[in-house]
Image (cartoon, rainbow, N blue to C red):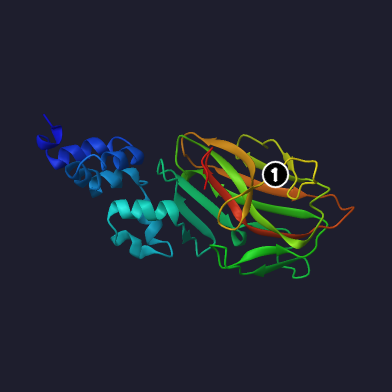
Amino acid sequence: MDFTEVLPKECMSLILSLTSPLDACRAALVSPTLRSAADADAVWERFLPCDYEEIISKSSSPSLLSLPKKDLYVHLSFRPILIENGTMSFQLEKRTGKKCYMLGARALAVIWGDTPRYWTWTSLPVSRFSEVAELKRVWWLDVRGRIETKILSPGTNYAAYLVFMLDRHRIGFRDSTVGLNVNVEGIGSGEVRNVFLDPPEDVPQQCRERGDGWMEIEMGEFSNESGEDGAVELILREVDTSYYKQGLIIEGFEVRPRDIGT
């Protein structure tokens, strides 16, 4: 006997809500009856973060709350929304519904960032943010971001990434590394990763293309076990003053579930 002919739609929706977004999508392919149950708001609301209404209502796109829940989930999986007055973005990891955030350049503490001869703020069509930070020339590079752990998904291993590009006039990134690290409040400093943003020919590429016009490189990782009050500091640093650096363009620092691509 076909169970979809016996069980009420509400019962099938309840069962599917206890699975995963991927399972619900697979179930929707089985039959029209199961598709109706799998696409129900009751299913997809369980896959959304418990505070999704608060996040979206304070974002640049509050009208998204009028969408059916599955459409909302899909939108947030593929199109980040701006929050915190446009200085951060929020989206979902499409397979799990876990939270992803990017701290835009304006949300970062950039040493000498308000001095035009060192840094300029400009807009680029490929950026989700209204402004990105373009390095004109510095000897001392220090950029930091901070994100509260309570806004992240609990019980999740996260990785942080520097999202950037280099212009054709770049100097100082081919023959020297920069330091990247992630510090969890109350635990101490994480390992400093010394990486090439513009590696020499004999050094393996450590960055990767994101598919949105930007490059990224991992800064470090951390575990958000309980999601309680706390913070994580993300740091980009290079303080060798024997040479200057220029041509780095920073979109932001992204935090997303570990081993999950963009």
Image-based side of 85 in relation to 42, left or right: right
Q: Nearer the viewer, residue 161 or 32?
A: 32
Identified at 43% across, 43% down, the residue is 98
Under circle 1, the secondary element is strand
Query: Mark 1: few, some, or many residues within 10 Å (few <14, many ≥20)?
Result: many
Compared to residue 101, the image places residue 206 above or below, namely above
Identified at 29% across, 40% down, the residue is 24
Identified at 75% across, 46% down, the residue is 196
Identified at 23% across, 46% down, the residue is 42
Image quarter (top left, top right, bottom left or bottom right) of the N terminus: top left
Image-based side of 8 in relation to 211, left or right: left
Compared to residue 98, the image places residue 87 above or below, namely below
Residue 95: % across, % down: 41, 41
Residue 4: % across, % down: 14, 36
The disc labelled 1 sits on which kind of residue?
Leu
Q: Residue furthest top?
A: 1
Q: Quadrant for residue 14, please give it.
A: top left
Residue 206: % across, % down: 69, 43
Q: Nearer the viewer, residue 26 or 56?
A: 26
Q: Which residue is mark 1?
A: 180
Compared to residue 147, the image places residue 258 above or below, namely above
Residue 223: % across, % down: 54, 35
